[in-house]
Amino acid sequence: MDNRRAIDPMNPKNSRRTQPEERSEGSDHFAAPLGSSASGRLRFTNGVHRSVIRADLHLPGLYHAHFGDQMPMVGVQGGVVTIRYPRILSCDWLSYRSERPGEVALNAHIPWDIEVRDGASRLVADLRELRLGSFNLDGGASRVEVVLPAPSGTVAVAILGGASNVAIRRPEGIAAQLRVSGGVTNLKFDDRHIGAAGGELDLRAKGYDGATDRYGVIITGGANNVRIDKQRAARGRGSGASA
């Protein structure tokens, strides 16, 4: 018998908080059944700070999440998980100290699109086991690490509104294109390093044009201290940009 009760005002039939016998700590754990969903979409509609997104091959449901001191509203409908944090000024995000980061685990057996609106800071997205359709971060990114899985087809990764202290890593042997507008300082793309450049850049890894499975990375609004490279062997989760 399932004793979980619906709590989310955005979609009370689908978003549920685990009861005490189902959670290991705190009262901020959320989950939803996989049901008939053949794909998923994770949406942060009001920014995200100090959080981890990861894929879970052993997760039976659609997703499982827990959060730090800032409790968001969570809604689920038709495979779309929507997370909305309360409105906090960007300067308050920088000074805010949470005891632990929030974490969202996604069912790795279905494909996912990930979308963040209104910016991200101190975000780690360990997507190595995920079937990723797209990754879109709008509103700027600061101290963000994205570890990508093997792609199927051309997969778009977009950071709109500027990127600072960002690392994007892809599997060895996977080609990528990087397009940047707004100028760059201290940009590393595989073996190429650019100290400073204005205007627009279009960089392509060897073999990109002939590759079937590849990444297209777009950054608008400028890039500062950004690395686009290949995953190193024996990496631990979230070893680059700390959440």
Image: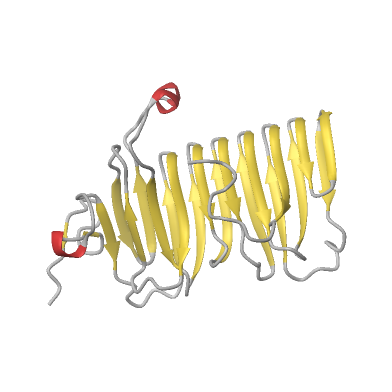
For this rendering, which residue is in front, 77 or 4?
Answer: 4
164 vs 74, left or right, is right
| 29 relative to 199, above or below | below
| 211 relative to 224, above or below | below
- The x and y percentages for residue 87 are 34, 31
41 vs 151, left or right, is left
113 vs 224, left or right, is left
- The x and y percentages for residue 73 are 28, 46
Q: How many marks?
A: 0
| Quadrant that contains the N terminus | bottom left
Q: How is the image coloured?
A: secondary structure
Residue depicted at 44% across the width and 65% down the height = 40
- The x and y percentages for residue 136 are 57, 49
198 vs 99, left or right, is right
For this rendering, which residue is in front, 197 or 14?
Answer: 197
Residue depicted at 50% across the width and 51% down the height = 115
- The x and y percentages for residue 58 are 40, 73
Residue depicted at 81% across the width and 68% down the height = 211
Residue depicted at 53% across the width and 54% down the height = 237
